[in-house]
Amino acid sequence: MRGVENALGITIPDNARIIRNLIAGIQYVQDHVIHFYHLHALDWVDIVSALQADPAGTAKLAQSISDWPNSSVSYFKGVHAKLKGFVDAGQLGPFSNAYWGHPAYKLPPEANLMAVAHYLEALEWQREVIKIHAILGAKNPHAQTYLVGGMSIPVDPNSQNALNAGSIATMSALAKQAHDFVAKVYIPDLLAVASFYKEWAGYGGGVGNFLSYGEFPNDNISNTDNLWLPRGIILNKDLSTVHPVDQAKVSEYVTHSWYEYPGGDGKSKHPWDGVTDHKYTGPNPPYEWLNTDGKYSWLKAPRYDDQAMEVGPLARMLVAYASGHERVQAVVNLVLQKLGVGPAALFSTLGRVAARGVETLLTAEMLPVWLGDLAANMKRGDLKIHDGEMWEPSNWPKTAQGYGWHEAPRGALGHWIKIENRKIANYQCVVPGTWNGSPRDGNGQRGPYEQALLDTPVADPEQPVEILRTVHSFDPCMACAVHVVDSKRRKITRVRVL
C-alpha cells in the first residue's frame, strides 16, 4: 500500500494513519507474546521438569516478581494437575516435540511450572486482545480494510456501522488487558528466565549490522521520516552513529539461491529491476541435497550497500536507542541493569529476546495514545478516512514507480513497484525472513542466521536445542524462511489429514 501511495504521491488522511498504527501496534504486541511463550519458550523451559515443582514454591516465586493475580498456590496446583494429566495420558499435545531433560535446560522446576502456567494463559489472552485487529482490520493476520489512499472502515460517532465511541471504549479495554499482561507477566517472566541464561549474551552475535525502516508515522506523508520508532542503520555494532537509509542501496543476490538472473547470478539487482524467476536449470528437484558451494536456498540474499543486515525487534531497539529515543533508552537500560549485563549483551541471542520484550512493552504503552488521537479527531468532527480521488486509476499517471517501507513484527519489509499504463509492470518485496535467513551472497558473505550460529556450543548434535535458541531468537517466519529437513530421512512427525 505504501509503495503504491509513494509512486502516486498520495498523502493519506490522519484517521487512516492512526488506524494503521493501531493495527500494526496490536499485531506487534500479540505476535511478540506468542513468540515468547509459544514459539521460543520451550527452547529454555523444560516442561516435563515442571512435574517436580512444588506449587507453593512456584506461587512464592511468581509473587516475588509480579503482582499478577493468578499466582496462588491453588492456581499452580491446578496447572500442575493438568500437566500431569497430559503426561500420564501420554498426550503432551503442544509439548510433545522437544528435548525434555536436555542438560542445556537450567530453570528450576518451580520456574518451569510458572512458565507452563503462563504459556496456557497467553493462549487465552492473545485470542482476546487481537480483537482490536478484527475491529479495525476485519481479519487477522491479513487485514482487509487497507485501500490505496487510506482505509475502508468508516469513522462516524453517530453510526453503529462505523468506528464510534463504543468501538473506542471496547478497544481501550482490550488495550489495557494487553498492557497488563505484558507488564505483569511477559516482562517479569523474560527477566526471570534470562537470569538463568546470561551466558547467552555471548552467543549469536550475528553480522553486527542492523537495519530498521522505522515505523508508526507521526504524520501522513508517504515514507515520512517523522516516526515513533526511528529509521536508521547501525554498522559493526557501533551505537555511536546511526546512518541514514537510502532505498537505492538495497539489492538482492541469487548467487546461492535457486533462482537465476538474466546475464548471470554473480551480481545483485535493485528490487525495481528484480526478477523472481522459478526457471532453474540445475538438478530437479534442486533440494534432494544441499550443495552449499552452489545454490542451496529458496531465499534470495538481500544486502544494503553490499552489507548483510539483521532486521527485527533488536534492530529497531538498537536504532531507537542510538538515536536518543528516551523511552527506549530508559527501558533498555533498566532491563540491562536488572540482568546485570552491559550494552554489549544486546548483540546476542539473549539481546534479541530482551529487545523483543522491550518493544512489546513500549508498543503496548502507545495503544491508548493512538486510540486517544482517534477519539480526539472524532470529537472535533474530523471523520475523513480515505482519499477517494486517488483510488480511481484514471487519476493516476500512466508511468510511475515507488517504494513503501514497513516494519513488520519480524523486521524490515520493503515493497518496490513499477507502474506502466496504469498497470503493474514489476513488483518486488524484500521481506524480513530473507534479510535474516539469506544464504551467502555473491561476495561470500553469510546471512544473519548463518553468521549467528558460528561458535555456538552444542552438547548433543542429535538434540541441537542450542541451535534452535539462536535461530528462534530471530522469530523465523515459516512462509518466507527455510524449512528444516532431515537428510537421513528419519520420520520426525506425522500429520493426519481428516
Image (cartoon, grey):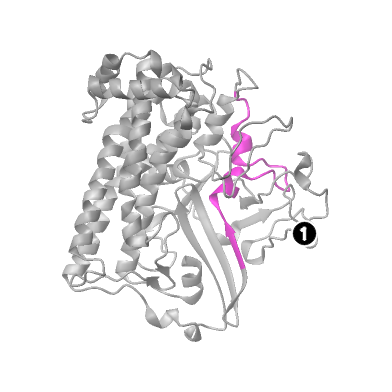
Q: Which residue is found at the position 35% from the left and 56% from the top?
A: 133
* Residue reaching furthest to the front: 498
What type is the residue that disc 1 sits on?
A: Lys
Q: Which residue is mark 1?
A: 279
Q: Which residue is found at the position 60% from the left and 25% from the top?
A: 464
Residue 254 is at least partly visible in this image: yes
Quick check: 72 left or right of 189?
left
Residue 340 is at least partly visible in this image: no
Quick check: 147 left or right of 160?
right
Q: Which residue is found at the position 32% from the left and 53% from the top?
A: 131
Region in magenta: 427-456
Quick check: 174 left or right of 26?
left
Crowd class of label 1 (few under 14; some 14 to 19; many from 20; radius 10 Å): few
Residue 3 location (% of width, % of height): 50, 67
Q: Which residue is found at the position 70% from the left and 29% from the top?
A: 490
Residue 185 location (% of width, % of height): 30, 32
Q: Is residue 51 magenta?
A: no
